[in-house]
Structures are given as structure tokens and as C-alpha cells.
Amino acid sequence: MIRINIKKPLHGVSGKMDLEVNLVIKEGKFIALSGQSGSGKTTLLRILAGLTKSDGEIFVGNACWQNSKMSLAPQKRQIGFVFQDYALFPNMSVEENLLYVNKDPILAKQLLEMTELEALKKRYPASLSGGQQQRVSLCRAMMNRPKLLLMDEPLSALDPAMRLKLQQDILELHKTFDTTTIMVSHEPSEIYRLANRVIVLEHGKIKADGRPKEVLLQTTGSQKFSFEGELLDIVQNDLIYTAIVSIGQQLVEVVLSSREADNLKVGQRVRVSTKAFAPSIQGKGEF
């Protein structure tokens, strides 16, 4: 278990506030951390990494990372940190960036192969695309086999296709290395795909905590509408099919017939519409 009970005074967008977080996280889980800008998400990651001081306690398994008497140095915490800006060493090749963290060429080769970067291992960061650089950053974060992987909106600067590719890489690494992952994200579709649990911060406090569908799903009223979105999932309960669709910053739920479910594929763009208050869903190209 990871036990977090911390407090830190902050200056948020609405003035002074206290970041107060009391959490227990099962090891090996994928946690999405969401909330408006200034709610304390990045500060919480920095406290977990030992980069920002706070009051309180942090325990990872039986190891104490922080209490009233001590705070373990960042380099002694078994963490990996992936930033928005990649933070790669420009004068080192892809392979050298990884080996700087841990001189384990076998592990470096495994990570580069998993993220399809093996052919680029001698290249320098400046010659790589943004998506490739972020994959290198992700591999580097895994080089010390972290107990806790922290990611601060790592995919925010990437286009949708590259985001999807990196989401798959992140999930594969998370499962392969059985690490506990905490990722800051504002994207409902990203959270739905990756996370087991969503924690929403508001003014430094936990506003919501639960499974992605429970926390993020918002259904609309009875007004007529027609919106385009991304089909995230099709769930079958007995004879009922339900589609989970990401529209803007919302997730909506639409009941399908078996024929509609057979004609749709997860990941495709769809249009959700209603006529006489009965929603229908069609695949892209059918409207």
C-alpha cells in the first residue's frame, strides 16, 4: 500500500489555500489525477517525488518516505518522473539518456524495443519528433524500475494519433513492470483508457474519488442534440449494450441495440443524437 497524508499551504488561482490529501493507494494501480489548473495536482506529484516540502507522512509499502522527523531525498525514492517538456539531455543519444539513469544495457534495449525506438537509439533528441522524445522520456523514467511512476500531463503537447500511441505504450510499461502510476490528465478519454481510479482535486481538496466511469460520466437532459465524439467502449450487460462516448470534456452513455453494437468499433468517431428523446448512435461515414 501507498499511504499519503500531507498538507501544504499554496497560492491557487483564487488566492491562499491548503493542499490537504489523505489517500491510500493499492500498489500496481493506475491513478489519474484531475482537476482545474491551480488545484494542487503538480504540487502533489512534486511532494511525492521529494522535490517540494510539505507537512505529513508518505509511506510506500513498509518504507517511510516522509514523516515529521525526516524526508527521504528524491534520489533515494524509487520513482520515475515524466514531465511535459521531455527534459532530455540534448548532448546525449537516446541510448545514453537511458544509461545515464542506470547502466543496464539489457533493460535499456527492452524498453526501446517495447516503445519501437531501438532503431533510433544513436539519434540525439533534437532530431526526434515530439512523440519520439516523450517515448524516450518515458523509457528513461522506467530505467530504475520505479515503485512509483509520476507523470505530469505527459501527452498534452501531442496530436491525437500520437497521444493514442503513447497511451498504449504507457499502459504496456505500467503492466509489464507492475509499477504504481499516478498521471495528471484533463482528458476524459485518456483517463477512461488508462486509469483504474480517478482522483479529482478542487482548491487543494479531494472533490471526487472513484472509478473513471463513476467520476467522469455525465449524462445530458432530455433536450434534442447531435454531437460528435470518440467511441471509448461498448459494454454488454445481459442483453443490453451500452456505448461510452467522449464528447468534449464529457463522457456520455448511450444504450445500443445488438445490431448497432455489431456495426461499431471502439476508437472510431461517432455522432450521438436524439430524436423524440431517444438517443441513437451512428459510425463516422454513416452521417
Image: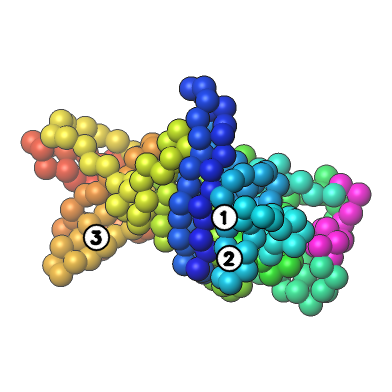
Residue 186 x, y percent position in the rendering: 48, 41
Q: Is residue 91 magenta?
A: yes
Q: How is the image coloured?
A: rainbow
Callout 3, which amino acid? Answer: Ala
Number of residues whose C-alpha sits closer than 10 Å to that of mark 2, classed few (under 14), some (14–19) or many (20 or more): many
* Residue hosting label 2: 60
The answer to if 80 sits in the magenta stretch is: no
Which mark's residue is nearer the viewer, 2 or 1?
1
The spot of residue 106 in percent (x, y) is 79, 77
| Amino acid, disc 1 | Glu
Residue at 67% across, 43% down: 52
The number of discs equals: 3
Q: In terms of depth relative to the viewer, which is nearer, 29 or 254?
A: 29
The answer to which quarter of the image holds residue 114 is bottom right
Q: Earlier in the sequence, mark 1 or mark 3?
A: 1
As helix, strand or loop, the secondary structure at mark 1 comes to strand
Residues rendered magenta in the picture: 90-101
In the picture, which quadrant includes the C terminus? top left
Q: Which label sits on residue 57?
A: 1
